[in-house]
Amino acid sequence: MLIRPSHQDHEAIRELELATGETLSDCYQCGKCTAGCPASMNTPPSVLIRKLKLGLYQQALDSESIWSCMACLTCSERCPKDVSPAAIIEGLKLIHLRELDPRADVGALGQEFLAQSTQQAVVSGFRKFI
Amino acid sequence: MSSEEHIHIPYYPGCTLKTKALGFERSAMDCARELGFEMNELKDWNCCGASFPLTDSNLMGLAGPTNVLIEAELHCKEHELDPRVITLCSFCYNTLKRTSHAFEKQPEKRTTLNAFLDREYKGTVKVEHYLEYLRDGLGFDKLAEMVKVDMSSFKVAPYYGCLLLKPGKEIGLDDPEEPTILHDFLDALGCTLVDFPGQVDCCGSYLVMREPEKAKALSNGIVDEASDYGAETIVTACPLCHSNLDKAQAANEGEGVPILYFTQLLAIALGLSTEEHKLEDNRVDPLAVITSCGAFDAAAKKSA
């Protein structure tokens, strides 16, 4: 397959780098982030970054895996090149959320969940998914 | 020790400590008094925002923690204290400490936030975790001398989770991969330490909101591993870790590994009454473990 990213894809990826403060080209695909990731992602962090480096912006943005990130920061902590995959994932999430595309249904949470959960889970969840 | 001799430290509780984790706050307060320091709650505080924004451009997420740091600065000025604030919750600690670090590295962010909030944060506050104070302020050696109860038959696994330690470069509390602060704390209390590999694994965190089964599997993995290594209880410093690890065992009908806040264990070691420490809020009842060790009869009776 020949990959031909459009000008818009390159622009979007550049904007993602600016928004997150990360430099994708620093990643040399060692895979330590993926090895340590507890989220069992179909598209794990190193693959996501590889896609972005290839210009496959839409594939990265549409990846369902980004919504499983728990921001435990294991990937960022272990990166030998000081890249933060967690920040890139949060950047991709924000693009969805800023375009009013929430990933958790507040109405479906239910009283039991809200009554039992810690505030920090609810506030964090709202920040990451809505 | 009279309260005049006590060291006064401004304290930021955060939302969860006032509701779901009341036992964490109360036990910490009681232990502080016993150990010779007083935690003075900030007069006017708001939610820290719970999670520090990971993207560099998201300054809105810094507004909450900046307001908290301003309150701490004002409190310390009013009471003529060194600018500092002590916290208990890992999320609050992480958010406040990273915000303060961001301002050190990028002072222009502080200027922007000050302009936005129309208040002035001078950037002076040292954010401290309760554990950090025990280690660096009081000292674990001194803590060990103050322990009144023989804890040696209590097999405890330290569980750190993520946000108490990561990112290591910004938090700087301990080694983010091989921490020892909770180990040393348990040593000071005289507990039988159960070292287990999952001590810094993620409990599933806020994923309980979107993918509860995945979060539960992670929490169960941690509890099972600690149990396999011989732990009879697990201590943590995070209300969300506590909640996740405790609730993951809901199907066990009260059996399992009880999860305690490190301050609840500290209160037992100091021989304090645990009556107000909400031990009964746990799904997995810790009293059985406490009473099964002969030395804890006194503490258990006090809380009964």
Image (cartoon, rainbow, N blue to C red):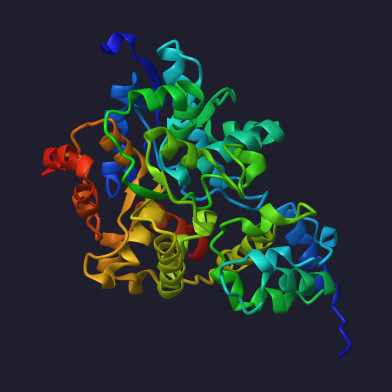
Image-quadrant location for residue B274: top left
For this rendering, which residue is in front, A127 or A64? A64
Q: In the image, is B157 to the left or to the right of B271? A: right
Residue B45 in view (yes/no): yes
From the viewer's perspective, is residue B31 above or below residue B277? Answer: above
The answer to whether B19 is drawn above or below residue B196 in the figure is above
Task: Indicate left or right for A12 with B235 as reference.
Answer: right
- How many marks the image carries: the answer is 0
In which quadrant is the N terminus of chain A drawn?
A: bottom right
**In x, y percent, where is residue A28?**
84, 64
Report whether B269 appears left or right of B115. left
- Give the camera-side residue of B230 and B240: B230
State the image coordinates of residue A124 (x, y, percent, origin top left): 46, 56
Q: Nearer the viewer, residue B13 or B179?
A: B179
Q: Residue at point 32% right, 46% down?
A: B154
Rendering coords of residue B32 (x, y %):
33, 26
Q: Is residue B106 visible?
A: no
Question: Residue drawn 22% across and 40% down?
Answer: B295
In this view, which residue lies farthest toward the bottom? A1
Q: Is residue B244 left or right of residue B250?
A: right
- What residue is rendered at 62% in x and 66% in y? A37
Residue A27 in percent (x, y) is at: 81, 62
Q: Residue at 22% across / 53% down in the picture?
A: B281
Q: Nearer the viewer, residue B132 or B194?
A: B194
